[in-house]
Amino acid sequence: MANGLPIKDVTQADSESGYNPEYPWKGRDPRFYNDIVFDGVKMVAGSIPNASEANNRYANLHTGGSYRDIATGSRTGYLLFKFVPRTANKYDQGYSYDKSLNIHLPYMRLADVYLMYAEAAAMGYGSPTGKSASYSKTAVDAINVIRDRASVGRVASKFLGSLDLFMEEVRRERAVELSFEGHRFNDLRRWLLLTQSPYTLKKSLEFDRASTLDPNKDPKENRVLNIRETTILERKFTDKHYWLPLKNNDANLYLEFAQNPGW
């Protein structure tokens, strides 16, 4: 949420974070609006010549909506638009949509540097206030630099009472700030959480619209009913996935050079 607190359960109201399951798009972390398309967001700015497709001007991401076709649309109830302009569609033809769309990602972002420092300082000194002797910021300060830039509430005091509680926030911050940038698999391996639930579960958000979509209304204000999560799949990772397989030719060079466990 915008105050920096997590949503504990999408089906339950939470007075602490301000989350309301009837208005699940309100009051969210600004990065949510930057990265994610949710139900009711306008997707097409120009004309839609085919009358039968006119309904697709707005993201119909509710259960049974036109954007929820598994073959061509969303399995999760959301769309990713962190790197793709909304005009990149067959109607608006943004970024030469009919030719190609190139997405450029940096190998490293400053936010990732702060996040790596926060994790290293906290783990190295055993505390959220751990810090390098040659740098002025503590681990929690580094997280707050990122949140300040994004206009999100700072790390709550309740997460500063122990290293374990703080690391929960570090993991969540990496998930939010670096979402869809290719870090999560290796992060989970580093934390030895790759085989643990809920990290193995991929879920969808299911819900019904409380009323017909009003195009003149801010989609954040749209009320929903029967919101819930369902499991799309469970990844069957095991301990062997904490290792990478060696090339068979290398592992067969001599008996003492064994293949990694499980491979």
Image: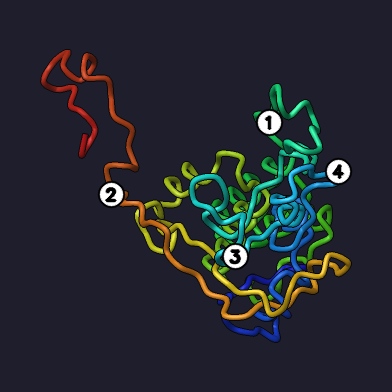
Task: Quickly name the residue at label 4.
Answer: 46
Give the alpha-carbon distance from disc 1 to disc 3, as whole Å.
28 Å
Residue at 21%, 38% (x, y): give it: 261
Local crowd at mark 4 within 10 Å, few (<14), some, or many (≥20)? few
Q: Which mark is residue 188?
A: none
For residue 39, which quarter of the picture? bottom right
Q: Is there CB contact under 8 Å for labels 3 and 4?
A: no
Secondary element at tag 1: loop
- Whichever of labels 2 and 1 marks the residue nearer the N terminus, that label is 1
Residue 62 on image: x %, y %: 61, 66
- Whichever of labels 3 and 4 marks the residue nearer the N terminus, that label is 4
The residue closer to the viewer here, 31 or 189, is 31
Task: Quickly name the residue at label 3.
Answer: 166
Q: Is residue 217 above or below residue 151?
A: below
Give the side of residue 214 with respect to residue 111, left or right: right
Give the number of the mark in front: 1 or 4.
Answer: 4
The amino acid pointed to by label 4 is: Gly
Give the side of residue 99 with respect to residue 206, left or right: right
Task: Quickly name the residue at label 2.
Answer: 238
Q: Is residue 30 above or below residue 4?
A: above
Give the alpha-carbon distance from disc 2 to disc 1, as whole Å.
30 Å
- Whichever of labels 1 and 4 marks the residue nearer the N terminus, that label is 4
Task: Quickly name the residue at label 1.
Answer: 105
Give the alpha-carbon distance from disc 2 to disc 4, as whole Å.
49 Å
